[in-house]
Image (spheres, rainbow, N blue to C red):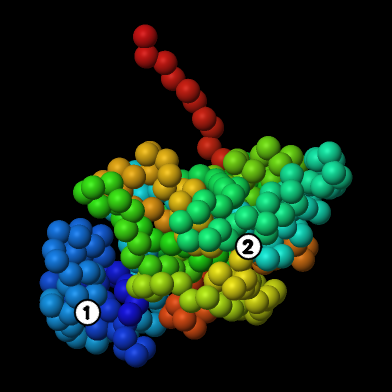
Amino acid sequence: MNLIQFFDLDGNRAVAAIQNDVARTVIGATSVYDLTIEALAGPGGLAALIEAKGLGATVDRGAILAEGRMLSPIDHPDPAHLYVTGTGLTHLGSAATRDAMHKANGTKTENDLTDSMKMFQMGLENGKPADGEKGVQPEWFYKGNGYSVVRPGHPIPSPGFALDAGEEPEIAGIYVIDHNGQPRRLGFALANEFSDHVTERVNYLYLAHSKLRACSFGPELRVGDLPAHIEGMSRIYRDGKVLWEKPFLSGEDNMSHTIANLEYHHFKYDLFRNPGDVHVHCFGTATLSFADGISTQPDDIFELEEAQFGAALRNPVRMETEHPLIVGSIY
């Protein structure tokens, strides 16, 4: 089962469940977050709650997307309580582009390896620990909160000070923290972990800056476990034509870490276990148009598609003008 959130034709929020490629409204539901909180308070899970509420009218996902009415598949009433974070160097082959960047800038270790390649090898050696054991921690980054999330189909803004506006096709885990402080996974979604790769290439220590950009995920939330093998397609359209396309792989068969290991090293921090918070955690990628010399332009359209996740995630890119920043004082 997949879930979507959207505005209906009257402008009211609604939720639909997708089964056998048919989307039907969940009766009485206006928010996946509220459904989740209700499910956590009851004896059954999310699927059982949706079944109990019942399904109503069929809706057209294509029309909802075309008309700009699709919402991200989960949000929070207070956007500051939705965290967007991620891990890098987690996929087989994901180190190649990063390694090339950092070799060019001279950030080699004592064994003539870049820090990126060294961390990647650590993941290969101990990123998939046995059950009950702790594996090596991955690279981790903070991306933003609910205010940095762009709805499917809407433009992803690139700030005026940015040096690049590049897509990163990823799978994101979707979590809500229950009243006991335990992370509870709803499922997974496609995500465009939009980043500034030129800024990152200047110096590896600029990685944190390069990640502080808007992002988009969805449009559908796949409820349940992550498939072991994911093979999607990442595309960029310019003037209505495909400028670039390349497959991307994910799922544990194509990763150097288990999902459980990545989850542990995120949620081990008390900060990330506050009851009621939502977490959208990106698991990394090995495919970037930047690696193939692509530099995006205003109104280029990113598209991420993988059949197991339903409808494609599409967002145009919008270049913004930098506004003067004035820091005031209050004495």
Relative depth, front residue between 318 and 182: 182
Q: Is residue 67 left or right of residue 85?
A: left
**Residue 64 placement (x, y as % from top left):** 34, 77
Relative depth, front residue between 130 and 330: 130
Q: Quadrant of residue 109?
A: top right
Any part of residue 81 in sight? no
Residue positioned 31% across, 86% down in the render: 19
Q: Amino acid at mark 2?
A: Ser
User: Residue at label 1?
Assistant: 25
For the C terminus, the quadrant is top left
Q: Quadrant of residue 11?
A: bottom left
Q: Amino acid at mark 1?
A: Thr
Residue positioned 39% across, 61% down in the render: 174
Kindly report the distance in space between the C-alpha atoms of the residues bearing marks 2 and 1: 38 Å
Residue positioned 71% across, 41% down in the render: 204
User: Which badge, 2 or 1, comes first in the chain's sequence?
Assistant: 1
Residues at marks 2 and 1 touching, judged by CB atoms closer than 8 Å: no
User: Residue at label 2?
Assistant: 256
Q: Is residue 321 left or right of residue 241?
A: left
Residue positioned 55% across, 71% down in the render: 251
